[in-house]
Amino acid sequence: MVAKLDIYKLNVFFDSNKVVKDLTLQVEPNEILGIIGPSNSGKTSFLKTLNRLNELYRNCSTTGLVKLDGKNIHDIDIQILRKKIGIVFALPLPLPLTIFDNVAYGPRMHGIKNRSKLAEIVEKSLTSSAIWDEVKDRLNEPAFRLSGGQQQRLCIARTLAVEPEVILYDEPCSGLDPISTQKIEDAMRQLRSNYTQILVTNNVKQAARVSDRTAFFLMGELVEISNTGDLFTSPKDKRTEEYITGRFG
């Protein structure tokens, strides 16, 4: 089986500072891969490399190879790539539009104008992100009226609306209350059947709850990757054990 994402000897530089170092790993279809590690371990830089967001930074450069379904991501049109690989950031940033128009924005940009088709996409996306029942009677309200947790699930729905294949999460529950966090984690589990997901989190317990496999990054290097249960109960590297037990980080 071809890996959904195949990363080989990836290096990411900001000026002369190497923030991701000779990273090699594969992400399997329909898995949730958790990525843990202290700050400045290259986790976010790795995520942004996968859909080429790092190219927005003039002082950023990369070497190595990243393949999506066996194809070099640099051979894929960048707009198509970013449609296939969506990203949800730590801080929810809904557009200054209604709830409906936030979710419909992406499909409209890709040429879908039919109102009934857009309504179908909006309902499906909001349902998949576990927020439909909370907003179905408020679709014409401004999105900023939603709570922080609801705004984050709205941003997940906005990502789903363009039918990606891979969803990247960069600390999606940072600063959210436990109930909102649980709803987002429940949504991730439900999405597993149709999407490949990569979750960067500083909450090791969250990685343990939702990830199929977990990778531990430290100072830009991949220290260890394993099935989540194995990594948390019998890590092979002492640094992994020290991190997950809270001795540093």
Image (cartoon, rainbow, N blue to C red):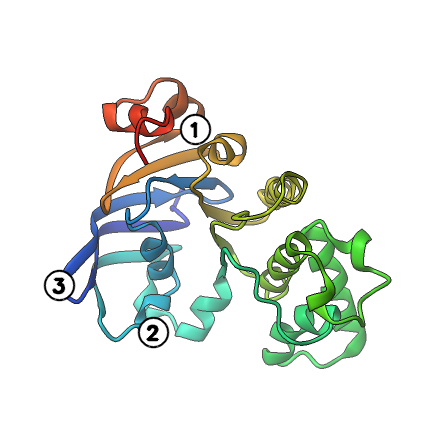
Say if residue 166 shows up in the picture: yes
User: Mark 1 sits on what residue?
Assistant: 228
How far apart are the alpha carbons under marks 3 and 1?
34 Å
Which quadrant of the rendered structure holds the C terminus?
A: top left
Residue located 46% across and 37% down the image: 203
103 lies above or below 112: above
- The amino acid type found where label 2 is placed reads Leu
Mark 3, mark 2: which one is toward the viewer? 3
Residue located 70% across and 68% down the image: 143
- The amino acid type found where label 3 is placed reads Ser
Quarter occupied by residue 45: bottom left
Q: Position of residue 153 (x, y in %)?
A: 64, 55
Q: Earlier in the sequence, mark 1 or mark 2?
A: 2
Q: Earlier in the sequence, mark 3 or mark 1?
A: 3
Q: Position of residue 146 (x, y in %)?
A: 72, 61
User: Mark 3 sits on what residue?
Assistant: 16
Q: Position of residue 18 (x, y in %)?
A: 17, 56
Q: Earlier in the sequence, mark 3 or mark 2?
A: 3
Q: Outermost residue toward the top?
A: 234
